Amino acid sequence: MKKLIDAIKNLALGLLTTGKHLGRRAITIQYPTEKWQMPERSRGIVTLLSDKETGKLNCTTCLLCERSCPTAAIKIVYDKDEKGKRILKDFIVDHGLCCFCGLCQEACNFAAIKLAPKYEFSTFEKEDLVWHIAKLQEIGRDVPYEKIERKKPEARPAVAKPAPKPTIAANPAETPTGKAHVIESGKADAIPVSEKKPKIVDKVEPEGEK
Amino acid sequence: MEIAGIFKYLYEMLAKSGLPQLAVDLIALVASALIVFTFLAVTALFLVWWERKVSAHIQQRFGPMRTGWHGWLQTIVDMIKLIQKEDITPATADRPVFFWAPIIALTAAFTAYVVMPFGKGLIVSDLNIGILFIIAITTFTIISLLMAGWGSNNKYALLGGMRSAAQVVSYEVPMVVAVLSVVLFAGSMSMMDIVNSQAKIYQWYIFRLPFGPIAFMIYLIAGTAESNRTPFDLPEAEQELVAGFNVEYSGMKFAMFFFAEFVNLFTISAIAATLFLGGWQGPFLPSWMWFMIKTLFIVFVLMWFRWTYPRLRVDQLMEFSWKFLLPISFANLIIAGFMKYSRWFNW
Amino acid sequence: MTTTKALHTEEFLVNMGPHHPSTHGVCRFLLTMDGEVVVKAVPYIGYLHRALEKICENRTYPQCLPILDRFEYCTSMSCEYAFCLATEKLAGIQAPERAEYLRVIMLELNRIASHLIWFGTTSLDLGAITPFLYGFREREDILDLFEMTCGQRLTYNYIRIGGVSRDVPPEFIPKAKEFLDKFPAKIEDYVKLLNENPIWMIRNQNVGILPREMALSYGVSGPVLRASGIKFDIRKDDPYSIYDRFDFNIPTGKVGDCYDRYLLRIEEMRQSSRIVRQALEQLPSGEIKTKVSANFKPPKGEVYSRIENSRGEMGIYIQSPGDSKKPLRVKMRGGSYNHLQVMPEIVKGGKIADLVAVMASMDIIMPEVDR
Amino acid sequence: MDRTELTKYLLDRFSDKLQLLDTGKAEPVFILKAENLLEFCRTIKADDTLAIDFLCNIAAVDTGDLFEIVYSVASTKNRIRFDFKITMPYENAEIDSIQEFWAGANWHEREVWELFGINIRNHGNLTRFLLPDDWNQGFPMRKNWDAPDFVRMPEL
């Protein structure tokens, strides 16, 4: 008999808990009208960053990102000028192959490549996922990034003495490639990260890219 | 403002118009059937939408929002989609059985409303064997489930069909006994008499301790099992049998099954409201509005069950019905008998 | 005298899977059924075989990490960590203090997220749809924490050989604390909804009982092993990282049925949130990575390192030839591999509904079985 | 029972049959001859100071010139974990099945057979289960394996 009373009590308890949620506000957002404000570090599309003033690409074709990509999604086409210095001709990223791991972003010492917090780039054909230099640069135009203070390369002493640590970050994040340049320091106040409630971007019609 | 008056007036107008008595009756019956059919179609559509909204808000999400304000057009859009979908009949299916199954399901679901008292005078025909007629008709759904299971020649459908037949049969018995205890008290099986015997609020059968609430609970549990809803929704247990008996159905036939399921849900709660909560009895609102309020409240409780409880296994389900629900309903019937013929409880 | 001729019944084969709502991932069971009773269940796997081990063999060590993320995507933090732990043991690298704490925080949060997936899918498989939504609502908060630090919500690629890739942003700790304060109340909701629910108890008690000897001989590990009454947790019995600095206890079951496994995982969620709370308080400041060059060559040797992830023992065996920057062999061992092996023994004689309940309670997912 | 005690105990218990390898970076790794594998497993399982009751992993390795099968075992009662390996040449590589001690070895050995081609004696169920049923392109995990659609990483 006691088991029966227990059973009824717990069944009612279950009803109560679900009933309790009836009054609460829904927490889902209606996607096309409201968009989820992605945190500043979230890794979306691969983009090439360019200098704000001169509009020139930061990339110095050092091929480090191409080597560090686990799925060989990056292909850099370059030709050498007379002094043997590489001139960047084309920078191809196949977003079909890319696994958005961010290893290229970490391998780059010149803040030339960054995974922007954008995700709306689905296409109907696989070939459209292969992006070339023009598109990568155009999408990367409005992506904020940390400009690195680079001393003149020849003035650098032979031993790669770590550059003076900038005071902006309380705990500097060193890069894996031995140099102590701070690329993406822990400071993330470039874009205010969304508080608990998703910041609702106003009526945004999907960007017009192809 | 009583709608029954309008129908009575229309009927006199028709009778005076000089048509032979047979034609008059025929037109009246066909008209009332059409009215009940459209009323039920609209309520079924509303129930589908309402279930999706209730389940959404229980789970802290919005539910359909895009078709019209808060998605009220959603069910109509679904219906149109289902109607224009291709209606596939499996090659090795048993063609006539496969074809007639949804039609029987739908007709069984609708004919139960012949004796349903929607309001004071609002009843299609007040048979004196009202409740017995409803129970007899609702058992037709078993045949349609079996036909669907067998007709679609698919292992999963067969398993689903067998399970649902066993389940509906075994939950029919306690349901009938629970209804019997109410009929015993009301003294007659006609739905109007049952409702009239619950004139005052303390006369509602749910408040007639000790047999009332027990009979109500038994009826509600057997009702959920009857309409194949969680925690007894074995026949189309997605996780085990993919989709149970309606796995091979698509397009219009699937829409019929889906429609029949929600009309069944409305029938179960309408009977529960009529038998235990005093049908259309109520202080100042018009009678049909009371009927709707009580029925929709019970529909809400059934939906609440669905979005809270897990599912029972087949043998546990059978065991629960035969070994637990049936003995209690018999005991309840005996108590009701004593109460009926004792001096104190007979108010 | 009526002779009751034995009713001629015939067993029939039912294919459950590979596209079936309750096989987590893509797995097929060929069931020989006698009516509702399962006579024999033969699992067919290999639908998700991506040859991860062959891929790792021609990637450098840092490049292996995104591959390891896909080894078990519900707790990819623990796969990365297992690989980094093995490489660090191989090369004798020691991660700095702050990195160790960050790793433990991320691992335990990942364990809670994985248990929440399990909680959602178990209740979904047994018919209760609402707990699935509640479980995933909590998991979203954890995923926000992950996305804030490493940028992805499922395949994080956050832990590096010798530390972690990036430091937590300033608003990580307050948000994590806010989640930890809210979480116990949410677990109470789950407990109220399902724990004592008679239907839940009937469906789960004495179903799929795994005796101790069979559990051990089949190499079952993690919550499933502990539910059978064997108190064995790698974090305590073969301690790695800094788990010895936190106090948390290991729940064990008695009977080893689905209900014990259920209670055990709910308790583990509480213990993990305790660990995260302690780790957040003791989080030191300082370096987050020791420098490891991109084409780093570990010395010649082999190591099998194992950690306790939400599904049991996750072991990574690495053999490095010493002169090349690519591992000679990487063998990944996940918990579900052995759990799926023991499934047919437990499920024999039960109903098809029990097969679904046992599969859900063993928390089997297919990527770590097929690799 | 830390690493040195364990190594000393094992070496003097199986003095002739067991040698310690230096490549074990974390736990000790021993090398064993193929014929006394079953006997070795029987004793380490029965021995109560070792009480090895948990087979963690069986990994086959193709080191370019010979096969190695590495068994990682552990004990849940007392904190013991170590590996032992068996080397064998390429041609007709064969090993006994150790299912009778740990039933969990069934699928591990089956995988070794399917991906490396090492035959497992009296295994009982050597059928294909990871690769597609109509797979006829040899044993993929071998170093010398090559197939038309095997995409290699571009050498930079």
Image (cartoon, coloured by chain):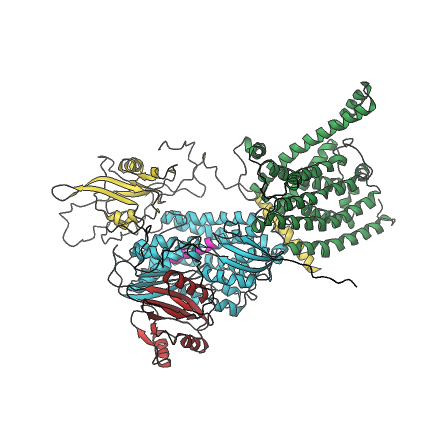
In magenta segment, residue C112: yes
Judged from this view, the residue extending furthest toward the left is A82
Q: Which residues are magenta?
A: C103-114
Chain coloured red in the rendered structure = D
- Name the spot of residue C319 as percent of width and height, x first: 31, 64
Q: Hey, which quadrant is residue C210 in on the image?
A: bottom right
Relative vertical location of residue A195 with respect to residue C74 in this rendering, above or below:
above
Question: Is residue D66 shown left or right of residue C347?
Answer: left
In magenta segment, residue B227: no
Relative vertical location of residue A92 with respect to residue D154 in this rendering, above or below:
above
The reply to whether residue A146 is in sight is no
Instruction: Please state which of residues C280 and A142 is positioned toward the viewer in this rendering.
Output: A142
Question: Is residue C38 shown left or right of residue A202?
Answer: right
Q: Residue at x 39, y 42 (%)?
A: A38
- Name the spot of residue B66 as percent of width and height, x first: 52, 33
Q: Main secondary structure of the magenta part?
A: helix
Instruction: Please state which of residues B261 and B310 is positioned toward the viewer in this rendering.
Output: B261
Q: Hey, which quadrant is residue D136 in on the image?
A: bottom left
Q: Quadrant of the C terminus of chain C?
A: bottom left
Chain coloured cyan in the rendered structure = C
Q: Quadrant of the N terminus of chain C?
A: bottom right
Q: Hey, which quadrant is residue A47 in on the image?
A: top left
- Name the spot of residue B40 as percent of width and height, x first: 68, 33
- Name the spot of residue C228 as percent of width and height, x first: 53, 66
The reply to whether residue C345 is in sight is yes
Look at chain B in the picture and name its colour. green
Relative vertical location of residue B180 with respect to residue C287 in this rendering, above or below:
above
Chain coloured yellow in the rendered structure = A
